[in-house]
Amino acid sequence: MDEETPVEHVFVFLDWQNVYMRARESFHDPYADAYCGQVDPIDLALELCKRGAPGARRQLAQVRIYRGIPDQAHDARGYAAARRQIGQWEKDSRVKVFTRPLRYPDGWTPSGPEKAREKGVDVQLALDVVTCGLDGMYDTGIVFSADQDLVPALEYMDRRRISRGKPRMEVVAWKGDYGRRPNRISIGGGRPYCHWLDNQAYWGLQDETDYTQPVVRAAVKGPPKPGPRR
C-alpha cells in the first residue's frame, strides 16, 4: 500500500433495528432466540473498512448507531436490556449511540398483539448523514439500513459527491437464504455501491450475548484471614 495515499475517514451509520431484524429474516427461522440477529458494531464497521477499493487507506472514525429505546415504566426488562447493550457498545470510544423513545399504542402490554414502534429514528439518521457530510467529518459514509425513507438523503449526498468530489456514500445489506424483501437502498444506476454481507460474514460478526440477563459480577476477595495463633 502506498503510504502517500490519503487516509479515508469512515463513518458507519447503523439503523440498529433494521440491521437486527433483517439479519433475523435472512439467517434465522422466526422462532430463533432473541439474540439471533445481533452483531458486534465495531467488528461490523471494521469489516466494512477492509472492503474498500484496492489501495485505499480506510480508517474507522465513528460508528453511529440509531435505535429506539423502551420506556422504563412500560417495559422495565426491555429498557434494562437496551441499556446493558448500549453500555457494552460505548466501551469503544468510536461508538456514538443516538436513541429515541419507543411509541406505545393505547392499552399496550408486553404479551399483547401490538408492538411498540420506533418514531423519528430514520429522520435523525438521515439528518446526520447530511450534516456530518457537509461539515466534512467523513470522507466515506456507509449506511446500513433497508429503509427507503433514507433515499432522499443519499440522493443529496450523491449530487454533492458529483459536484465536489466527496464524500462518497456506500450502503450495506444482508444476503441470506431466508430473506425475501429487498434488503438494499438504491438511488438508481447501481448507486450507491452496496456491500453484500453473506452467511459467512454474518456468522463472523454475530453477538450472542443475552442482554436481558443481568451481569453477574464475581465477588471481590479480600486478603486471607489469619489462622489461629500458635
Image: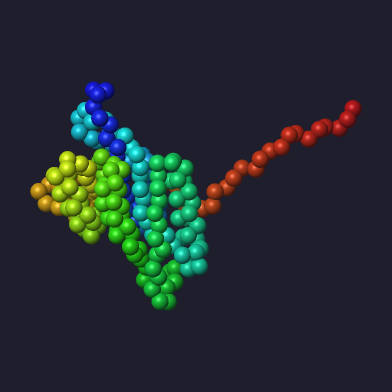
What x and y, as percent, mark residue 117?
A: 35, 66
Residue 166 position by quadrant: top left
Residue at the extreme left? 189
- Front residue (pair 16, 100): 100
Residue 91, percent from left and from top:
47, 42
Residue at 13% in and 44% down: 162
Give the residue at the far right of this rendering.
230
Which of the 4 quarters of the picture holds residue 49? top left
Foreground residue, 127 or 55? 127
Q: In the rendering, at what x and y percent does residue 228 appear?
A: 86, 32
Q: Position of residue 120 (x, y in %)?
A: 33, 62
Q: Does residue 191 appear to the left or right of 128 in the view shown?
A: left
Quadrant of the frame with the N terminus: top left
Q: How is the image coloured?
A: rainbow
63 with respect to 213 (left or right): left
Q: Farthest residue toward the bottom?
A: 107
Q: Is residue 89 visible?
A: yes
| Position above or below: 94 against 149 | above
Q: Which residue is located at x 31 percent, y 34 percent?
A: 59
Q: Residue at x 46, y 65 (%)?
A: 71
Identify which residue is drawn at 48% across, 48% down. 87
Q: How many marks?
A: 0
* Residue 206 showing in the rendered view: no
Q: Quadrant of the C terminus?
A: top right
Residue 69's quadrant in the figure? bottom left
